[in-house]
Amino acid sequence: MRVFLTTDRLLLRRFTEDDLDDLVWLHGDPEVVRFLTGGRPTPRAHLRDQTLAKILAWYEQGPLSRWAAVELSSGDFIGWFALEPGDGHDLRQAELGYCLRAASWGRGYATEASRALIAKAFTDLGVHRVFAQTMAVNAASRRVMEKCGLIYLRTFHQHWDDPIPGTEHGEVEYELLRADWIRRVGPGGGGLGS
């Protein structure tokens, strides 16, 4: 097991091909994927051939990717967290992302791991900008972004062939620049992750 980062309650580790069943389970829960697919489960073949293959390839290309989140107290897979290359190639920008099982919601896990990832991005990975995007109507995800210090940047609209409910309100983007983060927490990172 290749551990990327630990927090007080979570361990983030590299995905392996053996994690496919957990990804299928997570992305098969309509409540979990409501703001990703409108509640439609993601097919197993797509998760295997596209999602997981992309994640595993990222590990070989650099420090930014997506990691399985494991609850330390139980050892259970609870979802994933990501710092993905901003435009697919620019390693100075990282897109923060997360997807957790519904039973883990409201426990502060998303904020805890996201803060630790931001600290690692700015102190260890050479990232200069962390950003996150979600549907404008995804209030819970927006709260996590704000708790982590990301600042609202813009609302934008995209064209979707098969829009999901809420799309008409647009997408939002939040960001945090390394210089602003250092001003808030100090050069040592303020103990926001290990």
Image (spheres, grey):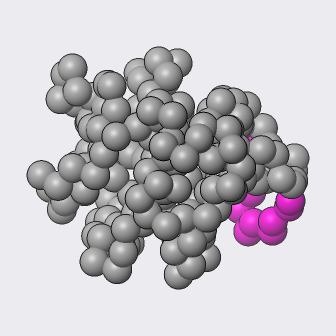
Establish if 8 lies above or below 193. Answer: above
Q: How many labels does the image show?
A: 0
> Residue drawn 75% across and 66% down?
160
Left or right: residue 48 versus residue 82 is left
Q: Residue 139: x percent and y percent?
A: 73, 31
Q: In this view, does 41 lie above or below 159?
A: above
Residue 76 falls in image quadrant: top left
Which contiguous range is marked in magenta?
156-167
Q: Main secondary structure of the magenta part?
A: loop
Residue 77 x %, y %: 26, 36
Q: Does the magenta stretch include residue 166?
A: yes
Report if residue 18 lies within the magenta region: no
Taking the spot 59% from the left edge, 41% from the top edge, the residue there is 186
Q: In this view, does 88 lie to the left or right of 29?
A: right
What residue do we see at 39% from left, 46% from top? 80
Which residue is found at the position 25% from the left and 56% from the top?
A: 14
Quarter holding the C terminus is top left
Q: Is residue 140 visible in this depiction of the protein?
A: yes
The picture quadrant where one finds residue 5 is top left
User: Which of 160/157 is in front?
Assistant: 157
120 or 45: which is nearer to us? 120
